[in-house]
Amino acid sequence: MSRNPKESSPQWHLSTKMLVALFGFFLLAAFLLRIRSFAGILVVSIIVYFLMTPLVRIIERIAKFSWAVATNISFLFLLMVLVVVITALGLAVAQQLQSLFDLTQNFFTGLPVQLETLIEHGLQFGPLTLDFSRFDTVTLFEQAAGYIDLLFSSVSTVFLSVSSVAIETVVGFLIVLVVAYFLTLDNARLRQTFVGFVIPGYEYDITRLRGALSRLWKSFLGGQLLVVLITGLLFWLIMSALGMRFSLGLGVIGGLARFIPFLGPGVAGILVGVVALVQPSNWFGLAPGAYTALVILFVILLNQFVDYFFIPRILGTSLGLPPAIILIATLLGAVLAGALGLLLAAPIVASIVLLGRYVFRKMTDQSPWDPPIDETPEKPEPALARFFRRTLARPEGE
């Protein structure tokens, strides 16, 4: 008996589709719960893959290498940079710890002599003299030795915890690099699979939504990285010009703070203020309070310059969200997903808003492209920028 060539698979009923969709949703939710400890590493790997792909493409086009060779060169360069940075930071931390250890050792080595001197001569407060010879110094020394032993045992526990966290961090970095490497190496297959996903009748909608989401995330990640680099460089130069200690470290912190909207620059400014306040001296001979106020003033001016000059030109209005929404999303992201939620809250909320607009239009039988939902409204000119533009503008007739 021959098979009919026109025979086709029967279509599913609406109830079957809903049942399969619910089953798939619960299966996906259970899978995400099972891998939640690995989710952060996976997300960071995807971000690294997203950022490394343009570099690999540039090397491929300029040097005429194959994609695999360009990928190997790019990740080898990234690995060398990470090794140099980690080694430099490790040496700096080791030197600081060695200095702290020497200081502590010298203090406890000379402690018996200092205590004997204190017992013999007492402690003088102006006209008053506290005579320790009347006290039971043996008991006091035993109690002090017990507290010191407890302190050192606590410090050793902290060092063990820090060592384990450092090892976990290094292993996490290696996993991120390996996963991002293989994602970049299979970039062509991934793009083909991603682009090949279509729903009959929705080809145009999926293509346009995919393009809008791609532009949003590319603009955020690439632009944010450039803003971080520029801010860190300017921060370092200004802190060096003001004679701040640890200017390079403060520049790194000031640049990385740009990854966290609103909260990051504020926390970095507070840290800079604390460092300026405890700095023993400065180039201008100012009092600590006045010097701290001067440094904070320059930090505020730098943040305003970055906010009103660089960010509108580099990031533009890609997210299209009000600042209040971004701030609330950042706080919620920190509560729900920690540091990763802080970094990615804004683009995730922007993506949800874009998809929500599409769903709302479809639910209300409206066209999602008339007017288009992927158009970003123009951002109004900030008041400070408008003031400077009008002040510096030439009068007519000159």
Image (tube, helix red, strand yellow):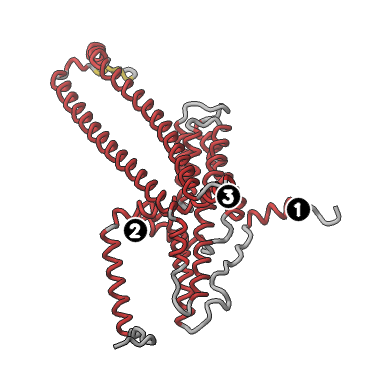
Q: Amino acid at mark 2?
A: Leu
Quadrant of the image containing the N terminus: bottom left
The residue sitting at 54% across, 49% down in the picture is 60
Indicate the position of residue 326 as horizontal and vertical percent values. 47, 60
Indicate the position of residue 194 as horizontal and vertical percent values. 44, 65
Q: Which residue is mark 3?
A: 61
Q: Which residue is mark 2?
A: 336
Q: Which residue is mark 1?
A: 393
For marks 1 and 3, the one nearer the N-term is: 3
Q: Farthest residue toward the right?
A: 397
Query: Distance between the Cα atoms at labels 3 and 2?
Result: 41 Å
The residue sitting at 49% across, 50% down in the picture is 67
| Nearest to viewer (mark 1 / mark 3) | 3
Q: Amino acid at mark 3?
A: Arg
The residue sitting at 33% across, 45% down in the picture is 172
Residue 149 lies in quadrant:
top left
For marks 3 and 2, the one nearer the N-term is: 3
Between residue 57 and residue 325, name the one nearer to us: 57
